[in-house]
Amino acid sequence: MRLDHPFPSRRSQGFSLVELLVALVFISFLMAGMLRIYGSAIQGFATANETIKAQRDNRWAMDTLQDDLQSAGYFYPVRPVISTVDNVDSSAQNPVMILPGQTMTNKFIADPNNPSATPTNETITYDELDYLTDQVLPITATLSATPTDTTHISVTASYGDLSLIHSGDFAMILDAPYPGNEMDIVVVGGGPYSGTSGTLSLSVAQMQDPNTGAPLGAYGSLRSLYHQPGTTVVFIRPYQVVRYALLPMALDPANPQATVPCMVRDQANYPSDGSRIAWPAATADASTLATAGVTRTVVAENVVGMRFDMSANLGQSWTRAADWPTTQANLNAQLATLAAANPGVAYVSSTQDPNNRLWYRYAPILFRVDLTTRTVVRRAEYNTTTTPTLAYRTRTQTLFVQPRNFGYGL
C-alpha cells in the first residue's frame, strides 16, 4: 500500500526568490570583477602596443637619419665647389646649417573616442638641419655598346630605370684605365628618359677642372671611344640640399582636417643664387613639389621633438644656440681653437672662409641628435600629473654621428 504525502518535500521545491537574488548579486560582483580584469588586460595590451610602436618609430627614424648623416658631405668626383655656394652670409643657404627654434602647428584629435571631432591646435618646436651633398642615384647600369661618338652613350639598367636620370647628372664610366683609355666622367644632357635601356645625350662643358674649377669640354664629352660593353656606369646628382624638418601631414582620409607631426626629408638642387631655400609647405601636393624641384619623403610619424647640435672637439662642448648665426659663431670659435692647437694638421679655422666653401671636409664634426616620438592616441594612464586629463606617452633617444666625409680632406 502506497501512501503519498499530500505536500511535496522541500527538496523538490527549487530555489526561493531570496536565494536567486543573493546568487544574482554575487554573480554580478563576479562579472564586474571579471570585466574589470578583462578591460585592464585589453587596455594594457593596447598601451604596450602603442609604446612599442613609438619606440619602433623612434628607432626607424634614428636609423634613417644616421645613414643619411653618415653620407653627408659626399662629393665625387672631388672638385672645387661652385661659386654660388655661400658659406659666408649666415642668411644664405649655407652648405651645413642648424636652424633652431622652428615651430609648426599640428591639429590633433583631443578625444580619441570621437575621431571626427574638430581638431585641437598644438605648437611643436624643433630644429631644422640642412646640408649639401652629392647623391648617388639608385641605378645599376652598364654600357650597352662601345661609344661611336663623344656625345652619346648607350646604357642598360639592371636595377632602377632611366627615368631616375635628369639633365645635369654626372655619369661615371668605371672601366680600368689603360693606355688609350681612361675612366670618363661626363654630364648627362637632354631627357627625359625612361625604360631600362636607351641612349643618353651628353652635355658640354659643365664639369669642372679638379684643380682650377674651370669648365672642361673634355669632361662634358667623352674623352675616349674605347669603353667596352658591360662596363659599369654610376650616376650621381650633384649639389643636392638635404633638409630634415617636422611638418604636420594630413594622413587620415577620414578626417583631413587632423594632422600628424612627421619627420620629413626634403631634397632639392642648390639654388643658383645661393639664397635660402623656401621649402614647400606641408600641404603641397605632388605637382607643387615637382614644380619646386623638391623630393619629399615622410620618414616617421608622431615625431614631436628633433634637436641637432654640433661639436668640433669630440663632444667636450657643444655649439647650438638660439639661432644659426650664434651657433655658427660658437662653431667658429671651436674650429679656431682646434686649428691653433694643431698647427701641423690642415684643420679649417672657420665655417665662413670664402676660399673654403666646403669647410666641413677639413673639420672633424660630431653631430648629436635628440629625437622624441609619442604614442598615436592620448590616454589617462599616460598622464604623469595628478590632474585627471588625457596625455601622450613619449620616448626620446639620442644619437651621436661623425659623418665619414667630414674631415675627409685631412
Image (tube, grey):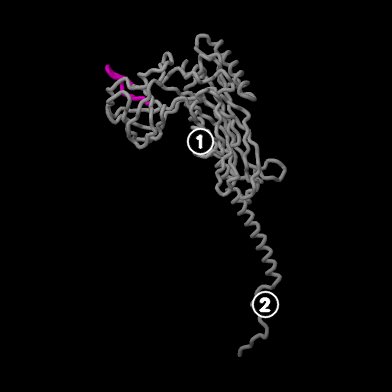
Regarding residue 224, the answer to whether it shows in the image is yes
Q: Residue furthest right?
A: 387
Residue 168: image x %, image y %?
42, 26
Q: How many marks?
A: 2
Image quadrant containing the N terminus: bottom right
Is residue 64 visible to us here? no
Residue 141 is one of the magenta-drawn residues: no
Q: Nearer the viewer, mark 2 or mark 1?
A: 1
Residue that label 2 marks: 10
Q: Residue 252: x percent and y percent? A: 56, 46
Q: Earlier in the sequence, mark 2 or mark 1?
A: 2
Label 2, residues with CA under 10 Å away: few <14, some 14-19, many ≥20: few
Start and end of the magenta stretch?
171-183
Q: Which mark is residue 31?
A: none
**Nearer to me, 17 or 105:** 105
Residue 178 inside the magenta-drawn segment = yes
Q: Residue at x 50, y 39 (%)?
A: 286
Viewer-nearest residue: 386 or 235: 235
Badge 1 marks a residue whose secondary structure is helix
- The residue beneath circle 1 is 289
Amino acid type at circle 2 is Arg
Q: Main secondary structure of the magenta part?
A: loop
Give the x, y percent position of residue 243: 53, 30
